Amino acid sequence: MTKEPTVSPTPGPGDDAQPAVVLTGVRKHYGATRAVDGVSFTIARGEFFGLLGPNGAGKTTLIEIMEGLREADAGTVAVLGTSPWPRDRALLPRLGVQTQSSAFFVRLTAREHLATVAALYRAEPAAVDRTLALVGLAEQAGTRVEDLSGGQRQRLAIASALVHDPELLFLDEPTAALDPQARRALWRVLRDLKGAGRTIVYTTHHLDEAEALCDRVAIMAEGRVSALDSPNRLIAGATSATRLLVPAERLTLAQASDLPGVSRASLEGDVVVLETEDPGPLLAAVERTAGLHGVQTRTATLEDVYLTITEARSTSERSTTS
Ligand SMILES: Nc1ncnc2c1ncn2[C@@H]1O[C@H](COP(=O)(O)OP(=O)(O)OP(=O)(O)O)[C@@H](O)[C@H]1O
């Protein structure tokens, strides 16, 4: 993924003032399982919206409802101003969908595969090579799909979701099989898409990725939205603690606990982790006791917020069921 051709700036048809998605009280139960249990939120046009949550939280069910692949049991769903259920043929070309289990024509080359997808959507033929270049597959255009690596297939799946220039893109863990370089390259592609006005609904288990890319994230647990805001606001609202990481050979846990302002001290691998609300005096004390060489400071991340929310949720579930 070296080249980064620009994305066509033309937004698709539709009213840009209208939200991309509006969900109100959406529910979906499978027998006794409340997969989606009363979800309401709005996704603005042009927003990069992350849907996060542990396995089984209800993300896929909710996305399939938005895509028009499943009917909600209750609530209302509007996607680009229309109801996706029953399936609306006029809506389908305005959506781009990449899933974990994308189907490929494996005996075709990457270009032939994408040309077939483009023809299904009646996209212009020039879109094929443009989209292959966009996802960094220009050099593999003549390679059979069955000979592509896992990460290259992942990029082809994204190209297949993009080739018809949709207004709203659903990307389900698109970087799951990518190496770190390819992952960062895809981040740039996704930022370009957002810059070109596309709305992106994104699921990922990479919290650093959600923090770097998403305008807002919804954290789901047990079928409900437990938190919804920008990553920065979620982080700022969740904790003010700073963590100091001190090489363990220079500070014992007993010494650490006696330092001023330490709210918690623990040993993680070869570092002692000190949590504090007041890093200034603690840093000075660490300098006197252990020196500052190799000491790192960490502020909270979206991953900390996510773990706090999802662990609190599963703890309260355990206590109500026991
Ligand atoms: N077709 C189905 N029939 C019965 N139960 C289902 C079905 N699909 C999902 N479920 C259940 O609904 C709940 C939510 O599943 P869902 O796949 O929506 O979660 P998810 O957040 O996408 O999980 P993951 O991160 O593992 O993909 C789970 O308890 C799951 O077992």
Image (cartoon, helix red, strand yellow):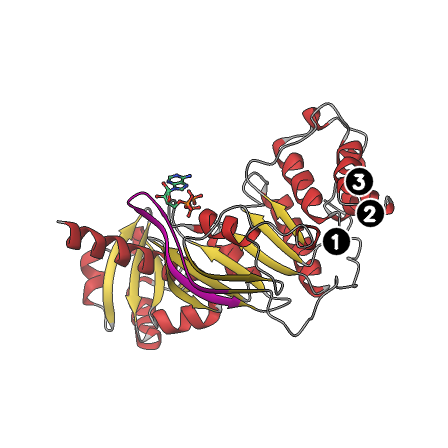
User: Taking the image as drawn, is residue 175 in sight?
Assistant: yes
Q: Find the residue positioned furthest to the right.
A: 126
Q: Which mark is residue 165?
A: 1
Q: Amino acid at mark 2?
A: Ala
Q: Which mark is residue 119?
A: 3
Instruction: Note whether 100 is above or below 53 in the view shown.
Output: above
Residue named by callout 2: 127
Q: Badge 2: few (under 14), some or many (20 or more) residues near its Cα, within 10 Å?
A: some
Nearest to viewer (mark 3 / mark 1)? 3
Q: Badge 1: few (under 14), some or many (20 or more) residues near its Cα, within 10 Å?
A: many
The answer to which of marks 3 and 2 sits earlier in the sequence is 3
Instruction: Name the spot of residue 173 as percent of width and height, x first.
Output: 54, 46
Q: Amino acid at mark 1?
A: Asp
Instruction: Name the spot of residue 68 as percent of width and height, x first.
Output: 56, 50
Instruction: Name the spot of residue 79 as percent of width and height, x first.
Output: 58, 61
Query: Which of 54/24 is in front?
Result: 24
